[in-house]
Amino acid sequence: MTQPDISLIAVLIASILGFGLGALWYSPKLFGKQWMAALDISTEGLQEEFSPARTYGTRFVTTLVAAYVLARILVHTEASTLVAGFETGFLVWLGFVATFALDGVLFEKRSFKLYLINSGYYLVSLMLMGALLGLWH
């Protein structure tokens, strides 16, 4: 099986975009306060046993993997425009994230508000990364 023609620079930039969006999304300027309230956790509680290098390093790697997989999906579906990438990001979110993440509400008794905050981040992140990767094919 031959490897698809994927720009690793585009994947890296898409990862940085998604990671940066997360920093903004979960900041007090956007949804950070509501997210902590939905988790019923304080800033102090959030920082207990918190390792920034491990947490942010792992999160960046997972975002990098997601961007690479999304790039592979775009190649396989021949989505090579900004709009096609945007739409593919939406469909990946709808088919996998929105559906499976709902289990947190259904089985873990997580609040629907938390679901909306987290799923909203994944929606915007996947659509932005998809748009960039679709445009930069």
Image: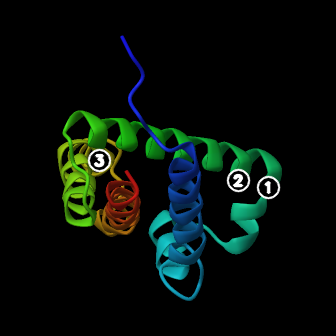
Amino acid carrying mark 1 in the image: Pro
Q: CA distance from mark 3 to mark 2?
A: 21 Å
Tell me the residue at 56%/58% (across/down): 13
Q: Is residue 42 toward the left or the right of residue 125 in the image?
A: right
Amino acid carrying mark 3 in the image: Val
Residue situated furthest top in the rendering: 1
Q: Which quadrant of the figure contains the N terminus?
A: top left
Classify mark 1: residues with Cα within 10 Å, few (<14), some (14-19) or many (20+).
few
Which residue is label 2 attached to?
56
**Residue 89 in view (yes/no):** yes
Which residue is label 3 attached to?
97
Residue 44 shows which numbered tag?
none
Which residue is label 1 attached to?
52
Label 1 sits on a secondary structure element that is: helix
Residue 28: percent from the left, percent from the top? 59, 84
Nearest the viewer among 21 and 109 is 21
Q: CA distance from mark 1 to mark 2?
A: 6 Å
Which is nearer the N-term, disc 3 or disc 1?
A: 1
Q: Is residue 11 toward the left or the right of residue 103 in the image?
A: right
Tell me the residue at 51%/38% (across/down): 65
